[in-house]
Each structure stands twice: as C-alpha cells, then as structure tokens.
Amino acid sequence: KPNIERMLFVDTETTGLSGGTGTVAFLVGIGYFENDQFHIHQLFMRDYSEEFFLLQKLVQIFREYEVLVSFNGKSFDMPLLDSRFIMHRLREYQKDFYHLDLLHHSRRIWKLRLDSCSLQSLEQHILHVERGQDIPGAEIPGRYFAFLECGDMSMVEDILMHNQYDILSLVFLLAEIVHLYANPLECTYSQDLYCLGRVYEKVGQTSRAIECYRKANQL
C-alpha cells in the first residue's frame, strides 16, 4: 500500500487531442500531498522554446514519487510525454513507478450503470459536483494558439482553472474508488455491486465476490 505522499497526480493540456509527433503538452499540472495538505503546481509553456525546460523540471519531479495517478494517462498523457522526453534526449527520467490510471478502475466499477465513464460524467454521477463555467476541452488548443499570438495570460486563465479542476477530481475519484473496493456492500446500485464482484472474482477473493453478487441480486 503506497504512502499517499509518494503519489503524484498528473494531468496535461495539449496542442491537440489526437496525439502525434506534432502535439505538445503546453501545461502539465501536478498535485501531491505534503503534511496533510494537497498542493497543485502547474508547469506552463509560454512559448515552444520553453518546452525543454518544462520537461527537464518534470524529470526532477517524477524522480521524487513512486506512484503516478492519472485519468487516461496510460493511453494519452504519458505516451505523449514519453515522445517529447525522447525528442529532447531526456530519456533518463524513466523509472519504475506504478501508474494508476483511474479511467480503467472507473470502467471496472461503473461501466454497466453509466453511459460514459468520461471524467465529466464521473464528476456528475459519482462525485456529484458541477464545475459551473468551464472551458470545453476541444477549445483548449485554439485558445493556447491565440495566446501564443498575443502573450496575454488572461487568454489561458480558463485553461489553468480547467487543469486544476481535473487534478482535484483525480483526488476525489481515487478516494471514492478506494472506499468502494474496501466497502463494496455499501453500494446502492446492483450494477456497481455486480462489477465489484467481478473485480474480486478475478483477483481470487471468491467469498467477497459472492457477497457482492448476493447483495446485487437483492437490490
């Protein structure tokens, strides 16, 4: 069981949503616990010439943690960062940390009940929070390109806030997942209980799986 202070929560904002060699992570948000407080730092690239320094700082930060927590980071954020590290000859960052991708765990628990396991859907249906005014993800690259033209930081304030919301959602989502894994019978939805039963069955905890299936059948 990892120490919560050895976990690094990571979310990126990029110049494109499809990845590829031309896509750059212009903002990397990181969150971590220290002395019972949660801190968020944001590494922001004011121009393409600053990418090397952003990545170099990220290398230093990664070395200090054992567990990386993301949402869809295994498929998007980390492959993108990996390619940028290699392009800038910063391959020495690679270390043996455990990557906890909350999208995968969310799908295991809620895929039968929810139409979508996007972070926005999970915030609404699982965490019961509303962001209010928030820039849509599809608009973020265009907004950043506009910032590069004028250099006005007010152009990216919404992006910085969006990134902070994403990181905070990671923290609350992880807490909810850990709670459900530890207390599955507190579930009030049969679909979630069935999915938790499947999880326990796959890892060989048969008695706990049966408990989940039985309660699911009663709901």
Image (cartoon, rainbow, N blue to C red):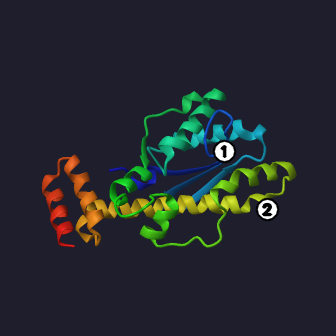
Foreground mark, 2 or 1, reads 1
**Helix, strand or loop under label 2:** helix
Would residue 203 be found to the left or right of residue 92 on screen? left
Question: Please, what is the three-letter code of the amino acid marked with disc 2?
Answer: Ser
Q: CA distance from mark 2 to mark 1?
A: 21 Å
Q: Residue at x 64, y 38 (%)?
A: 55
- Report the disc number at residue 91: none
Q: Is residue 116 left or right of residue 136?
A: left
At 61% from the left edge and 42% from the top edge, which residue is drawn?
18
SS under mark 1:
loop
Is 98 placed above or below 180 here? above
Up the image or down, 26 lies above or below 216; here it is above
Instruction: Report the residue that reaches farthest toward the top.
Output: 89
Could you classify mark 2 by the number of other residues whose Cα lies within 10 Å: few (under 14), some (14-19), or many (20 or more)?
few
Q: Which corner quadrant of the image does residue 133 belong to?
A: bottom right
Residue 197 is situated, as x and y percent measured from the top left of the image, at 22, 57
Which amino acid does the dot numbered 1 rest on? Gly
Q: Nearer the viewer, residue 192 or 3?
A: 192
* Tags 2 and 1 touching, CB below 8 Å: no
N-term-proximal mark, 2 vs 1: 1
- Above or below — where is 117 with respect to 22? below
Residue ID at (21%, 67%): 216
Identify the residue shown where x is 79% and y is 62%: 154
Residue receiving disc 2 = 154
Q: Is residue 63 above or below residue 29?
A: above
Give the side of residue 19 with respect to residue 212, left or right.
right
Nearest the viewer among 218 and 129 is 218
**Where's residue 140, x and y in %?**
69, 54
- Rendering coords of residue 215 (x, y %): 18, 68
Residue 178 in view here? yes
Tell me the residue that label 1 is attached to.
16
Q: Is residue 179 left or right of residue 55?
A: left
